[in-house]
Amino acid sequence: MEQALVVENLRKCYGKFEALHGITFDVAPGEIFALIGPNGAGKTTTLRIVATILQPTSGTAAVYGFNVQKDAARIREIISYLPEEAGAYKNLTGRQYLKFMAELFAPDMQVQREYIERASQITGLGERLSDKIGTYSKGMTRKLLLSRAVMTKPRLAIIDEPTSGLDVVAAIDIRDSIRRAASEGMAVLLSSHNMLEIEYLSDRVAVIDNGTIHDIGTPQGLKEKYGKSNLEEVFVEVVRR
Ligand SMILES: Nc1ncnc2c1ncn2[C@@H]1O[C@H](COP(=O)(O)OP(=O)(O)OP(=O)(O)O)[C@@H](O)[C@H]1O
Ligand SMILES: [Mg+2]
């Protein structure tokens, strides 16, 4: 089966600074794949290249066979990208925002309604969808944005720090939403510096530090390989070797 994402020997320089030193990984359809590593590791840089927002310095990334440099327009039709610091229009209600986004993505009214229905359920916001986004807490806004990112059933969802700044309950809700969407075949590329949290969400993780991927595996496989009880301890061990 064709891979949802193939990244090969990807390098990225910002001026003289090399942020990615040639990283390689792939993501299968329906798979939730996470880049885990500390601040400045190169996670957002990688996600932005896959989302066709940044150009790689060398190496390749291909989304369902489409090259990020040659076929960017095609890729944008089949992905969604949720940046870490995304905001929403504070003067719209949650429901108005979802409607606006649905209209942007689908010309057909029936499809728009399906999108809004799916997204509304994913947000778990219930009655609060009638309130202005400006009155939402950080976690509520994040849930709304996340629901927008998956409502169109993109073939690859790219989500930067899906649960950052959320409480445990909101983080679990968001995890469940991502899981449900992936079980319908959507591939997901995540990033997180919260290694404990991401363990429960991801099918496989890549341990990234200083622009280099040090190891890739299932959370369970990595814990067994390094004889550790959680991914944070795995990270320390992997990076030290
Ligand atoms: N536009 C830029 N210009 C110069 N350097 C940059 C730029 N963007 C990122 N960098 C550098 O590249 C490295 C990787 O940054 P990146 O944002 O990809 O890290 P990250 O893993 O997402 O970190 P965080 O967990 O803090 O979000 C860092 O050293 C950062 O300072
Ligand atoms: Mg980042």
Image: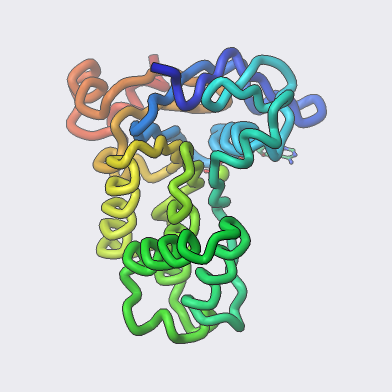
Whether residue 201 is visible: yes
Q: Residue 177's spot in the image, x, y percent?
A: 31, 54
Between 105 and 40, the one lying in front of the other is 105
Between 208 and 30, the one lying in front of the other is 30
Vertical order, 18 against 46 (above or below): above
Tell me if 51 is positioned left or right of 168 in this view.
right
Between 116 and 137, the one lying in front of the other is 116
Quarter containing ligand 1? Answer: top right
Q: How is the image coloured?
A: rainbow
Numbered circles on residues, count? 0
Q: Residue at x 20, y 26 (%)?
A: 220
From this viewpoint, which residue is outermost toward the right?
Answer: 15
Between 155 and 166, the one lying in front of the other is 155
Q: Residue 228's spot in the image, x, y percent?
A: 20, 26
Q: Residue at x 39, y 25 (%)?
A: 28
Vertical order, 6 against 91 (above or below): above
Q: Residue 41's spot in the image, x, y percent?
A: 54, 33
Q: Residue at x 54, y 72 (%)?
A: 97
Vertical order, 188 against 172 (above or below): above
Whether residue 144 is visible: no
Tell me if 231 is positioned left or right of 211 in this view.
left
Image quadrant containing the C terminus = top left
Q: Residue at x 33, y 22 (%)?
A: 237
Image quadrant containing the N terminus = top left
Picture quadrant of residue 223? top left
